[in-house]
Amino acid sequence: MSSIGPDWFKSSYSSGDADNCIEIAVTSQAVLVRDTKDREGGQLSVTPAAWADFVTFAKAVDL
């Protein structure tokens, strides 16, 4: 039996098989972020506006 849930994808800032990857899932009300190494662990949930602000900031400071 398969579970129904959000479609997760690897962050474009994650590279190859590195140990420090995150995955993102976008829903109609939130952007979810989780650690690739601990998919069953906790996840961060932020509003789409907060995520957009974070991405804009991260690009500006070249994290």
Image (cartoon, rainbow, N blue to C red):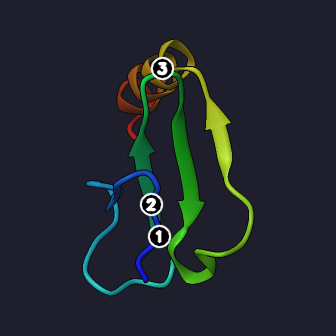
Q: Which residue is mark 1?
A: 3
Q: Please, is residue 54 above or below residue 42 in the view?
A: above
Q: Which residue is at a point 48% across and 20% down the rendered structure image?
A: 48
- Element at badge 1? loop
- Residue 35 in the image, given as x and y percentages of width and height: 58, 68
Mark 3 and mark 2: Cα distance apart in space? 21 Å
Q: Which residue is mark 2?
A: 4
Q: Which residue is mark 3?
A: 48
Report which quarter residue 27 is drawn in.
top left
- Element at badge 3? helix
Amino acid type for the residue under numbered disc 1 = Ser
- Residue 23 in the image, given as x and y percentages of width and height: 44, 60
Q: Is residue 13 left or right of residue 36?
A: left
For the residues bearing labels 3 and 2, Cβ distance under 8 angstroms: no
Q: Which residue is at a point 45% across and 32% down the rendered structure image?
A: 58
- Residue 37 in the image, given as x and y percentages of width and height: 57, 82
Judged by depth in the image, the label closer to the viewer, 3 or 1, is 1
